[in-house]
Image (cartoon, helix red, strand yellow):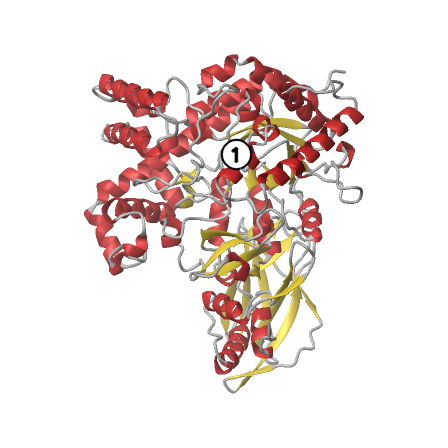
C-alpha cells in the first residue's frame, strides 16, 4: 500500500483520524487513502485532491485563529487545566468565570505563550494562555472574555476528579426485561415486572441492583426493531414497557372490561408463541393507551404534564413529531418527502400543528414512562437495594431513526460505527449506526451527549455503558466498505468521560464501562482513575502472563462488574453444553470445523474445572451442569470485584442465547422468552418460586455478604 500524501496525513491528524493502527495481533496496519478521504468527508472536510487538502488545512487554521475562545473548555476538580485566548496582537484581555449559581470568579492566572501571532485578513492575532483554577466547583459554567471592544463567551465543563465507589460489595440480577413477563403483563415484560423482580431479588436475597437491557425507544411502527442495541432513540424510552394499569387515569377509563379482554388475548397468544411478538403486543397495548390518553386529567396531573414538557423541551417535541411522522410516512426518514427530512424545516412545524394530537400522544407516552421509571427506582431503593436499577446505554442509534433525524447535524453521515477485526470476529463488525461527530459535539458544548447521559441516569442508581471505548476512539467504516476498511476516529475522552462522571456524581450513580475486546492498556487505567468500573466475564478472564489458563480469582480487578456470562453468549448451562459452537456451526459462522471448535471449548472448560478444584470449590470427578453453574458463581465471590452479576437466565437454568452476533434474522435475536432447563416458558411468578433461582440468589448473597 502506498503512503498517503503528507497533506492528507496532517489533515487526518488535525481531525483525530488515525492513519495507522495496531490490530488485535499486535501488527501495525496502514489505513487506505480512500478510507481517510471518506472519513474526512464525513467530518465535512473535502480531501480527495491535493488542492482540496491544502484548502482544508488553510480553512482549519483560519477557523482556529478566528475564534476568540475555544468552543468548549474542559476541566476537573483538583486539576489546573489551561485554555487559549485569541485577540488582536497586543490588545488587553479581561476574563471572568460565571459559575452555575451566578457567582463570579476573576483573577485568572496568565501563563507564558511564545507562539508567534497569525495574520488573519490583514490583522495580527495573538494567542495567550490562561490557567483554569483547580478549585472550581463541578458543573456547567461560562467564561466571559472582554477584548477587542467586544464580549465573547465559552462554556466550561468541570467534572469531579473521580467518582466515589459504592459502599461494600453488591450483587445484582441481569435481565432482558422483554423476555420476562408476568401473569398481568401485556404479552411482554414491562416496568411493573422490572419493579417486582427488583423487589424479589432485594427482599429475598439482598441484591443491591438490577441490571436491565437498554430500554431505549424503538420506532412505533411495524416491524418493531427487536434489538435493544439498535434503537430509534437513546434519549427516550420504548412505551412497549408501560404497564397500562399503573397509569393513574386507568381508574377513570370506561370499558375496563374491554381492556382486560385485550390483555388476556395478547397474553394467550404469547403463551402459545415460540418467540416474543413485539408488534402484536404493541398493537394491543397502543389501543389501550390511546383510550387512557383520552381520559381528562386532573388539574394536578395537568400541571405535572406541563412541567414535564417544559423540562424536556425541544428534544421531546422533536422525538414526538418524528414518531407521528413515522406513523404517517414510515420509520425511515430518508424516504420521507424532502421537506420533512430535517427537524427545522417549516413543513415539519406545519405537520406538528396539523397533527397536534398525534404528536402530543407520543409526548404523553414519554411522561408515563418517566412516572413508571421513577416509581420503579424508588421502590427498588425502598426495598433495600443500595443502587437500585442499573440501566444500559447502547453505543448508537438506528441510522433511519428519530435521533439520527433530530441530531443529524451532530452525527457523521456517510459512515457507520463498528469494530475492527479481532480474535473472535475476524471480519470485523459493522453496527450500522452513525457516530457522533467530535468536532460538532465540541462546538455545541456536548449538549446532546449531556442530555443523553442525564436522561439515562434520571431514574438509575447505575449505568452500564456499552463499548465505553467508543468515548475514546470509535471505528468508522465508510458506507459500502467492509469493516476491515475502516479506521479509528478519536474523541476528547476528557470531555466525554468527564460529562459521564459529572452527571453520575449528581445522580449518585455508579458507572460500569463495558471494556471488553481490544482496549489500549492506558484506557483501563484512565477509567479506574476517574472512578468508573470495568467489566469482567469469567470465560474471557485468561492468565496472559502464565499459560493462558483461567486468571486466578485474587487477580481479578476490584473496581469491576464481574459475571460468568453475557447476553452475547448462551446462558452458562447452554455454554457448558457447547450451544454457542453448535449454533454458529448451523448458521455457517465458524471459520474452522465444529469438531475443532468444540475441542478447544472443552479444553477451556476443563481448565476452569481444574481451577475450581484447585481452590477447593468442587470435588466431584464429573460434576453435573447445575453444580458447575453454582460453583462458577461461588468463584465470583472469591474475586475482589465490588460488583457481581447473576444472569436471570442462569438463575432459572435457561439454555438459549438471547443474541448471536453476526446474525439478524438467521436467529431470533432478542426475541427469546425466558424458559427453564426443560425449554418450557417461565412467567415472573414462576421465577419467584423457582428453587434453582432461590439457590443461585443465596449463593450471590453469601458471595457479597459472607457469614461472620
Q: Secondary structure at mark 1?
A: loop
613, 302: nearer the viewer: 613
Circle count: 1
114, 578: nearer the viewer: 578
Q: Position of residue 186 (x, y in %)?
A: 34, 24
Answer whether residue 130 is visible to the viewer in this image.
yes
Q: Position of residue 429 (x, y in %)?
A: 52, 51
Task: Please say if 520 is above or below 683.
Answer: below
Q: Position of residue 101 (x, y in %)?
A: 54, 48
Q: At x 78% / y 33%, what residue is drawn?
A: 554
From the image, which quarter does the C terminus lie in?
top right
Q: Is residue 232 left or right of residue 441?
A: left
Q: Is residue 668 left or right of residue 473?
A: left
Q: Position of residue 318 (x, y in %)?
A: 33, 49
26, 115: nearer the viewer: 26
Q: Is residue 71 left or right of residue 516?
A: left
From the image, which quarter does the N terminus lie in?
bottom right
Task: Please say if 229 is above or below 69.
Answer: above
Q: Quadrant of residue 30?
A: bottom right
Q: At x 67% / y 42%, what residue is drawn?
A: 531
- Identify the residue under disc 1: 460
Task: Please say if 143 is above or below 124.
Answer: above
Answer whether residue 368 is visible to the viewer in this image.
no
Label 1 CA crowd tier, 10 Å (few <14, some 14–19, many 20+)? many
Q: Quadrant of residue 165?
A: top right
416, 239: nearer the viewer: 416
Q: Can you name the residue that lies furthest to the bottom here?
A: 122
Q: At x 51% / y 42%, what residue is drawn?
A: 661
Amino acid at each position: 500500500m502506498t503512503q498517503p500524501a503528507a497533506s492528507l496525513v496532517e489533515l487526518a491528524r488535525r481531525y483525530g483520524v488515525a492513519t495507522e493502527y495496531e490490530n488485535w495481533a499486535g501488527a501495525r496496519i496502514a489505513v487506505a487513502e480512500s478510507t481517510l478521504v471518506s472519513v474526512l468527508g464525513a467530518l465535512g472536510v473535502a480531501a480527495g485532491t491535493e488542492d482540496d487538502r491544502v484548502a482544508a488545512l488553510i480553512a482549519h487554521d483560519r477557523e482556529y485563529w478566528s475564534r476568540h475562545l475555544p468552543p468548549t473548555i474542559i476541566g476537573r476538580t483538583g486539576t489546573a487545566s489551561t485554555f487559549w485566548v485569541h485577540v488582536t496582537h497586543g490588545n488587553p484581555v479581561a476574563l471572568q468565570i460565571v459559575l452555575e449559581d451566578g457567582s463570579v470568579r476573576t483573577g485568572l492566572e496568565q501563563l507564558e505563550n511564545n507562539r508567534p501571532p497569525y495574520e488573519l485578513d490583514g490583522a495580527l492575532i495573538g494567542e495567550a494562555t490562561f490557567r483554569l483554577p483547580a478549585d472550581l466547583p463541578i458543573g456547567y459554567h461560562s467564561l466571559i472574555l472582554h477584548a477587542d471592544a467586544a464580549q465573547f463567551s465559552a462554556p466550561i465543563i468541570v467534572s469531579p476528579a473521580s467518582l466515589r465507589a459504592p459502599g461494600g460489595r453488591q450483587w445484582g440480577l441481569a435481565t432482558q426485561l422483554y423476555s420476562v413477563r408476568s401473569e398481568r403483563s401485556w404479552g411482554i415484560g414491562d416496568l411493573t415486572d422490572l419493579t417486582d423482580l427488583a423487589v424479589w431479588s432485594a427482599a429475598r436475597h439482598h441484591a443491591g441492583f438490577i441490571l436491565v437491557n437498554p430500554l431505549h425507544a424503538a420506532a412505533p411502527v411495524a416491524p418493531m426493531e427487536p434489538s435493544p442495541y439498535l434503537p430509534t432513540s437513546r434519549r427516550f424510552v420504548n412505551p412497549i414497557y408501560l404497564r397500562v394499569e399503573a397509569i393513574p387515569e386507568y381508574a377513570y377509563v370506561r370499558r375496563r372490561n374491554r381492556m382486560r379482554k385485550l390483555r388476556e388475548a395478547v397474553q394467550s397468544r404469547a403463551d402459545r408463541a415460540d418467540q416474543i411478538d413485539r408488534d402484536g403486543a404493541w398493537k394491543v397495548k397502543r389501543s389501550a393507551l390511546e383510550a387512557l390518553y383520552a381520559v381528562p386529567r386532573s388539574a394536578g396531573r395537568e400541571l405535572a404534564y406541563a412541567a414535564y414538557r417544559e423540562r424536556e423541551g425541544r428534544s421531546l417535541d422533536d422525538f414526538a413529531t418524528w414518531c407521528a411522522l413515522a406513523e404517517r410516512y414510515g420509520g425511515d426518514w430518508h424516504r420521507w418527502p424532502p421537506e420533512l427530512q430535517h427537524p427545522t424545516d417549516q413543513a415539519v412545524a406545519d405537520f406538528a400543528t396539523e397533527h397536534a394530537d398525534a404528536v402530543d400522544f407520543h409526548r404523553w407516552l414519554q411522561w408515563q414512562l418517566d412516572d413508571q421509571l421513577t416509581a420503579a427506582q424508588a421502590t427498588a431503593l425502598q426495598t433495600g437495594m443500595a443502587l437500585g436499577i442499573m440501566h444500559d446505554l447502547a453505543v448508537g442509534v438506528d441510522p433511519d431513526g428519530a435521533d439520527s433525524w433530530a441530531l443529524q447535524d451532530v452525527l457523521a453521515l456517510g459512515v457507520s460505527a463498528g469494530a475492527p477485526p479481532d480474535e473472535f470476529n475476524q471480519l470485523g463488525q459493522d453496527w450500522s449506526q452513525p457516530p457522533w461527530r467530535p468536532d460538532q459535539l465540541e462546538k455545541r458544548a456536548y449538549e446532546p451527549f449531556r442530555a443523553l447521559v442525564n436522561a439515562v441516569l434520571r431514574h438509575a442508581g447505575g449505568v452500564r455503558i456499552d463499548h465505553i471505548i467508543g468515548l475514546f476512539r470509535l471505528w468508522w467504516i465508510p458506507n459500502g466498505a467492509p469493516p476491515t476498511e475502516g479506521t479509528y476516529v478519536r474523541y476528547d475522552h476528557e470531555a466525554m468521560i468527564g460529562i459521564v462522571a459529572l452527571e453520575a456524581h449528581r445522580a449518585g450513580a455508579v458507572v460500569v464501562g463495558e471494556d471488553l475486546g481490544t482496549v489500549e492498556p492506558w484506557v483501563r487505567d484512565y477509567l479506574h482513575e476517574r472512578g468508573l468500573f470495568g467489566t469482567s466475564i469469567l470465560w474471557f478472564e485468561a492468565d496472559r502472563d502464565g499459560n493462558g489458563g483461567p486468571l486466578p480469582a485474587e487477580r481479578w480487578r476490584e473496581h469491576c462488574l464481574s459475571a460468568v456470562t453475557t447476553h452475547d453468549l448462551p446462558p452458562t448451562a447452554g455454554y457448558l453444553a457447547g450451544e454457542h459452537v453448535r449454533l454458529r456451526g448451523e448458521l455457517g459462522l465458524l471459520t474452522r470445523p465444529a469438531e475443532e471448535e468444540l475441542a478447544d471449548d472443552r479444553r477451556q472448560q476443563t481448565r476452569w474445572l481444574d481451577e475450581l478444584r484447585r481452590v477447593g470449590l468442587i470435588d466431584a470427578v464429573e460434576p453435573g451442569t447445575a453444580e458447575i453453574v453454582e460453583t462458577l458463581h461461588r468463584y465470583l465471590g472469591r474475586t475482589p470485584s465490588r460488583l457481581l452479576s447473576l444472569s436471570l437466565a442462569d438463575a432459572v437454568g435457561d439454555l438459549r442465547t438471547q443474541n448471536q452476533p453476526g446474525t439478524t434474522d438467521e436467529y431470533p435475536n432478542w426475541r427469546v422468552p425466558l424458559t427453564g432447563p426443560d425449554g418450557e416458558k417461565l412467567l415472573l411468578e414462576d421465577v419467584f418460586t423457582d428453587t434453582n433461582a432461590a439457590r443461585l440468589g443465596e449463593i450471590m448473597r453469601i458471595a457479597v455478604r459472607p457469614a461472620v
